[in-house]
Amino acid sequence: MRFTKLRLTGFKSFVDPTDLVIANGLTGVVGPNGCGKSNLLEALRWVMGETRAKAMRGGGMEDVIFAGAATRPARNFAEVALTIDNADRLAPAGFNDSDQLEITRRITRDVGSAYKVNAKDTRARDVQMLFADAATGATSPALVRQGQIMELISAKPKNRRKVLEDAAGIGGLYARRHEAELKLKSTEANLLRVDDVIEQLA
Ligand code: ATP
């Protein structure tokens, strides 16, 4: 599984459709201050399922939509599409039936976010799981924000452990365990209710 292209439309400063081709080897992005280098990395995190507006340097998630400029009106939606080469068929189960994956996230004002994988509507959670199972995702330690090194140095041991766990690709397993625990709790509550009903009938 290899990221090959990132397409941004109406995302932050990228008002017109813009393709970032991620070739084999090292890809460098250079440019003057404020030209949008960090916005590219944020677009990558966002399409992988980032839910924290603060991590996108915004007050609310709709702040990722192009807010307008002197000569351009604001946009009503933002979209990011990430193309993944899956010729090696290493994508997690459920997403492994084609040589290429295109994950799209679109946010529309007053509507919210919607995800697609190869043009098929997909739940946010399933997109997050896809990346977590592939040992990457919005919180991947491979994506280093400005100031993150200092945060890591001064982090509590528990938070530092989380970074190691994400790097080891077991974040998805934790999410599944949490979900299983919630299901177990709700099943236990249902069983109690059944006991009550049986008692009333007896
Ligand atoms: P530096 O080198 O200083 O870190 P950078 O190249 O990483 O800068 P970014 O921080 O990615 O630049 O981009 C900041 C630019 O994006 C600013 O000009 C800001 O006005 C613009 N921007 C951010 N959000 C939006 C938005 N919603 N609509 C329009 N422009 C936006």
Image (cartoon, rainbow, N blue to C red):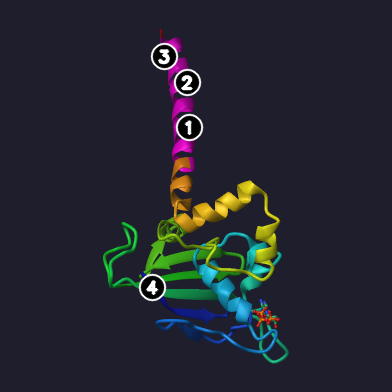
Q: How far across and down, in percent of the image, does residue 21 sit?
A: 45, 84
Q: Which residue bears the numbered disc 4? A: 2
Taking 98 as reference, is 38 left or right? right
Q: Amino acid at mark 4?
A: Arg
Q: Nearer the viewer, residue 13 or 120?
A: 13
Q: Nearer the viewer, residue 72 or 80?
A: 80
- Mark 1 neighbour density, 10 Å: few (under 14) some (14–19) many (20 or more): few
Q: Quadrant of the N terminus?
A: bottom left
Looking at the image, is mark 4 or mark 1 nearer the viewer? 4
Labelled disc at residue 58: none
Labelled disc at residue 186: 1
Q: Give the residues in magenta.
A: 178-201
Q: Earlier in the sequence, mark 4 or mark 1?
A: 4
Labelled disc at residue 192: 2
Looking at the image, is mark 4 or mark 2 nearer the viewer? 4
Check contact, mark 4 vs mark 1: CB within 8 A. no
Q: Nearer the viewer, residue 1 or 197?
A: 1
Q: Amino acid at mark 2?
A: Leu
Query: Relative to 55, is 29 above or below?
Result: below
Q: Earlier in the sequence, mark 1 or mark 3?
A: 1
- Mark 4 neighbour density, 10 Å: few (under 14) some (14–19) many (20 or more): some
Labelled disc at residue 198: 3
Q: Amino acid at mark 1?
A: Ser
Q: Is residue 154 visible in this depiction of the protein? A: yes
Check contact, mark 3 vs mark 2: CB within 8 A. no
> For the residue labelled by badge 3, is the local secondary structure a helix, a strand or a loop?
helix
Label 2 and label 1: CA atoms lie apart by 10 Å
Q: Is residue 11 visible in this depiction of the protein? A: no
Q: Earlier in the sequence, mark 2 or mark 1?
A: 1
> For the residue labelled by badge 2, is the local secondary structure a helix, a strand or a loop?
helix
Q: How far across and down, in percent of the image, does residue 77 sit?
A: 57, 74
Q: How far across and down, in percent of the image, does residue 92 sit?
A: 34, 59
